[in-house]
């Protein structure tokens, strides 16, 4: 059973919490030594012992836990979780009905009222991700709640926490029900994607880019040459090929990206002849492209927010401008750059300054044609707009 702890909040933080801010920051507390056991229910009070809100203690790189309710009488039990998940399901009822899309986010952390927890839907299979030991301590009531609400083929989970906030490797991520086929084929706007629910931290697709892939496919690539950098399993390349791209080139450092990308093309009946898949550092590829005089009509740039490769460290916040200048140099006249980032440490406004700087230094004019943030199923709390980490801009090169 989880412990209940009454803990006093600093005077200057009370109004922030009262206005509905969901994240518990270290600086809100006078004394964090009381927070011994993750998963403890915290009753937050002011200096006069007046009730403010209830939350749980769970360490993430973001903070010390999340607010769950502002109702003092509310018990944090399987009924509580049932209500939250039920609301989340009803918020996505259109997606459940949509036959052309069978993969989406069902529960998005604080956006759905429980920070540190996400649930993704993959054609009848459910994937729960726990972002702290604290939220993981509620595994039984949360699992019970989910099972009572949905007809599931099978349930899997990922524990994205350990001392370093990393994904916890384990024998298997399977929890209950049927085991998913390997791969499990899901659909997104009728594009097939091969998903592996039990093969490490990532399943093969980033669901938050659904609208961006669809826009590329429908509006931007017919007859065009496409370069997909940081391509992972090639999801953007698949969308481009299905949208009638003349050819695609996918570049990723990871060796596994080659068979994984081939597989995504194959399950969509795409002719592999016209698709290049290159295992390389993108910065090395830019050099090769320049040397060979290669250039492209559409380039997708979706780097990790932070990555360490053999010799260097890439940080989106520091290096996006430099990266984009390389991309601008190999984009054709009137070409389009899809500039994307999931970095949570800067907002859209700042992202636009990185972009502006890159074009300015390259002495090239551009216009922003489209702008995307998280899709509806990645629900964001109005009180926590920084939860909307995705930023994607379609940039038309004018020269
Ligand atoms: N754009 C992808 C997701 C990218 S995830 C999609 O929408 O599916 C980030 C990817 O960048 C990982 O696959 C990782 O292997 C790759 N990566 C990281 N650093 C790289 C580098 N310097 N050059 C090429 N790929 C890199």
Image (cartoon, rainbow, N blue to C red):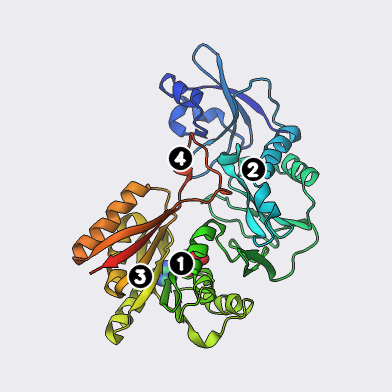
Mark 1 or 2, which is nearer the eye? 1
Is there CB contact under 8 Å for labels 2 and 4?
no
Q: Which residue occupies 52% across, 88% down?
A: 273
Placement of 246 over or under 356, stated as above or below? below
Tell which circle, 1 or 2, labels the residue nearer the N-terminal end: 2
Q: How far apart are the alpha carbons under marks 3 and 2? A: 45 Å
Q: Which residue occupies 35% across, 68% down?
A: 336
Mark 2 or 4, which is nearer the eye? 2
Give the labeled residue for mark 3: 311
Mark 4 or 1, which is nearer the eye? 1
- Quick one: SS at disc 4? helix
Question: Residue 91 has which mark?
Answer: 2
Place of residue 327 in the rendered image (x, y in percent of width and height, measured from the top left): 32, 70
Tell which circle, 2 or 4, labels the residue nearer the N-terminal end: 2
Q: Quadrant of residue 280?
A: bottom left
Is there CB contact under 8 Å for labels 3 and 2?
no
Question: Residue 219 has which mark?
Answer: 1
Which residue is outermost to the top? 48
Placement of 374 over or under 29, stated as above or below? below
Q: Which residue occupies 46% across, 21% down?
A: 14
Place of residue 391 in the rendered image (x, y in percent of width and height, measured from the top left): 42, 53
- Quick one: SS at disc 3? loop
Work out whether residue 313 can be spotted: yes
Mark 4 or 3, which is nearer the eye? 4
Say if disc 2 is inside 8 Å of ligand 1.
Answer: no
Mark 3 or 2, which is nearer the eye? 2
Pointer 4 local density, CA inside 10 Å: few below 14, some 14–19, many at least 20: few
- Quick one: SS at disc 1? helix
Tell which circle, 3 or 2, labels the residue nearer the N-terminal end: 2
Q: Quadrant of residue 146?
A: top right
Q: How far apart are the alpha carbons under marks 1 and 2? A: 28 Å
């Amino acid at each position: 059973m989880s412990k209940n702890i009454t803990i006093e909040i600093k005077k200057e933080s009370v109004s922030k919490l009262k206005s509905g801010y969901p994240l518990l920051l270290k600086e809100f507390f006078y004394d964090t030594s009381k927070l011994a056991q993750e998963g403890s229910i915290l009753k937050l009070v002011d200096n006069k012992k007046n009730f403010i809100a209830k939350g749980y203690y769970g360490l993430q790189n973001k903070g010390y836990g999340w607010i769950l309710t502002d109702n003092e009488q509310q018990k944090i039990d399987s009924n509580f979780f049932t209500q939250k998940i039920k609301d989340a399901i009803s918020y996505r009822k259109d997606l459940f009905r949509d036959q052309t899309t069978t993969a989406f986010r069902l529960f998005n952390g604080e956006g759905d009222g429980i920070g540190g927890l996400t649930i993704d839907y993959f054609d009848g299979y459910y994937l729960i991700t726990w972002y702290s030991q604290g939220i993981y301590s509620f595994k039984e009531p949360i699992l019970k709640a989910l099972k009572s609400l949905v007809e599931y083929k099978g349930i899997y989970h990922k524990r994205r926490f350990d001392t370093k906030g990393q994904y916890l490797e384990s024998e298997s991520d399977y929890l209950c029900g049927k085991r998913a086929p390997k791969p499990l084929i899901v659909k997104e706007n009728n594009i097939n994607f091969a998903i592996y629910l039990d093969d490490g931290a990532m399943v093969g697709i980033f669901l938050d880019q659904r609208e961006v892939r669809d826009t590329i496919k429908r509006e931007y690539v017919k007859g065009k040459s496409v370069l997909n950098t940081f391509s992972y399993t090639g999801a953007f390349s698949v969308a481009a090929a299905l949208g009638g791209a003349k050819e695609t080139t996918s570049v990723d450092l990871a060796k596994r990206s080659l068979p994984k990308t081939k597989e995504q093309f194959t399950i969509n009946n795409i002719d592999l002849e016209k698709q290049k898949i290159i295992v390389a550092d993108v910065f090395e590829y830019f050099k090769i492209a320049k040397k060979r005089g290669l250039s492209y009509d559409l380039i997708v740039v979706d780097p990790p927010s932070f990555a360490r490769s053999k010799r260097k460290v890439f940080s989106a916040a520091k290096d996006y401008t430099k990266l984009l200048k390389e991309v601008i140099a190999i984009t054709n006249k009137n070409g389009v750059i899809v500039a994307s980032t999931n970095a949570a440490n800067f907002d859209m406004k700042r992202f636009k300054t990185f972009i502006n700087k890159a074009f300015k230094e390259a002495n090239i004019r551009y216009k922003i044609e489209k702008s995307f943030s998280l899709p509806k199923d990645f629900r964001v709390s109005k009180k926590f707009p920084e939860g909307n980490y995705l930023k994607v801009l379609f940039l038309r090169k004018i020269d």
